[in-house]
Amino acid sequence: MTQRDVESRIQNLVDGKLAPDERAALLAEIGRDPVLLDIYWGYVVLECAFVRLTRSGASLRTEPTVITKTTRRSRKKSHIQWRVAAAAAVFALVAVPLHLIFFRLPPPIASLRVSPGSILEVSHIATGKDAPPPGTLMAGSRAKLDQGTLELTFANGVRTIVRGPADLTLHGKERLFLQNGTAWFYVPAGAAGFKVLTPGLIVTDLGTEFGVRTRPDSLDEVHVFRGKVEAGTQHGAKAAATLTAGMARIAGDVGDLNEIPPDRGHFLSTLPDSLPYLHWSFDAGPQFATAGNIQTAAGSDSSRLAGLENPQAFHKAKGRFGQALATTEALAEARSGWTGIESAAPRTIAHWIKLSPGGPSSQPIVGWGSHALSPFNPNPAFLTYLMRIQTGTVAGVSFGAYHLVGTTPIKDEQWHHFAVVYSGRSLTDGRPEIACYLDGRPEAMTPAFRTDILSEGGPKALAIQTLSSVPGSIPLTLFPRDWCHDGRTANMPLVLDELYIFEAALNETQVDSLFQKNRL
């Protein structure tokens, strides 16, 4: 009998679908086999853990915190009583003490740490004295990471680093379900057999180091860095393969496994000491390589801004802090290889800007994503821009068909700090939850719509879904021409300094710190 068959029988037992003789036979096996008992426990606690977490009704959180919640399963009382009574009768057949099975909850199986600024909600199947100690997880515990990074260390030596946004549940000491997120795993030889499940994949470790990615709008991936794993798809063809170091696969739409290049850059193997970020100071180097801890870009070629070497378009100037990047009126852009923050993940973009007279009536400053707007995804981009309105030139942010326009004129040849914070959530009317700041203070923004894509009456269709890794997407670019539709032949003359991008929603205090000190 295969592992999948065994797990199917145990699932049917938990669901009450087995005939009495089958139930008795399986319980006898479970009573004799510690491995089966562990699998059974995983399904029991999982059955108790499927409850939706109560979400905070607050808007942008004012302080990055770690929030711990404990929840109990809320089913009808009669159904719970039936489950307990049935379990008592069945387990009496194999003399397994009920107080060990149902009334003494399993001990913690993993410890948890988070990086500074992370926003995390943890729920357990038990409350009060039965809940695990703070900083630990038990079978059935769920961790929902809105932003930041978490580290889990299991008793058997397994270690994982998970980048937010992420949502995971422990099925047992050797099973983890990753609903969403990017996770790196180290599994020592003694813990071989550890399983990671996603909506599209089952990955079984065979003593290795590997990474798994699963996102709401993308296909699931597995990347092997050392050793080997067994990988299989959950649906359709249910393809399976043994992968060794240097191999990677993506789960296809029909349940096949397709080869992709391995990419360690998406995965962190240590817990960072801050929120994930990139920072261009424009102080040194012809291409202004970045600092930061987003592994796919920090200090690498992908963060270098190709095109800045054009002396007719760009030159150095005195900045708000140190040196800055100045543009002439020549039409030019500077493009990196970093694809940007994707989907609806939280993010913050902040920079200093100083404007001079002249130039066109609008100017994209920095952004990424796709400019191919459609009713199916009206907001595939994310960029800051400048726009001339009746009262003067103001700063704004665009997501595609929906954008926000500032109210304070800034074309005064003075330095101004502009920051945009997206929480990753939506307001009650469906609009994305956005906060904008000018010179450290909240800036009043006016919404605007691309009426050729959608009408003003349709904000509920305005979810942000930034496309950063599909054909035609534009990586992080300064002064991107692809979003200009006015037939321009020149850029707006300006000076740009201290560009920060965070994979997190900063609060007002943190934005003010960037404004005052150029650091968090």
Image (spheres, helix red, strand yellow):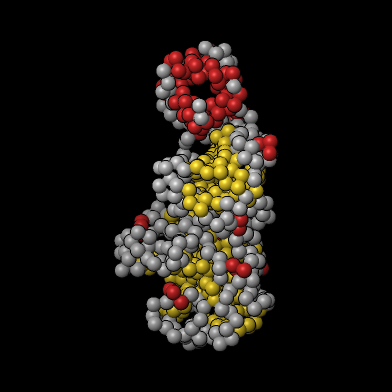
Q: Residue at x 57, y 55 (%)?
A: 262
Task: Mark yes or no: residue 259 visible.
Answer: yes
Eyeballing the image, is 410 above or below 245? below
- In the rendered structure, the answer to whether residue 211 lies left or right of residue 18 reads right
Q: Quadrant of residue 106?
A: top right
Residue 504 spot, x, y in % from top left: 56, 57
| Quadrant including the C terminus | bottom right
- Residue at 55 percent across and 84 percent down: it is 313
Residue placed at 59% from the left, 22% from the top? 33
Would you say residue 72 is visible in this rendering?
A: no
Q: Is residue 331 above or below residue 288?
A: below
* Front position in the image: 380 or 131: 380
- Specify the quadrant of the image occupied by residue 391: bottom left
Q: Position of residue 30 (x, y in %)?
A: 55, 21
With respect to residue 485, does 341 lie above or below?
A: above
In depth, the one of 312 and 518 nearer the eye is 312
Front-most of residues 507 and 139: 139
- Towards the viewer: 52 or 240: 240
Q: Position of residue 482 (x, y in %)?
A: 44, 74
* Residue 196 horizontal/vertical position (percent): 55, 41
- Give the quarter of the image for residue 350: bottom right
User: Which residue is rendered at x = 47% and y = 35% of the image?
Assistant: 50
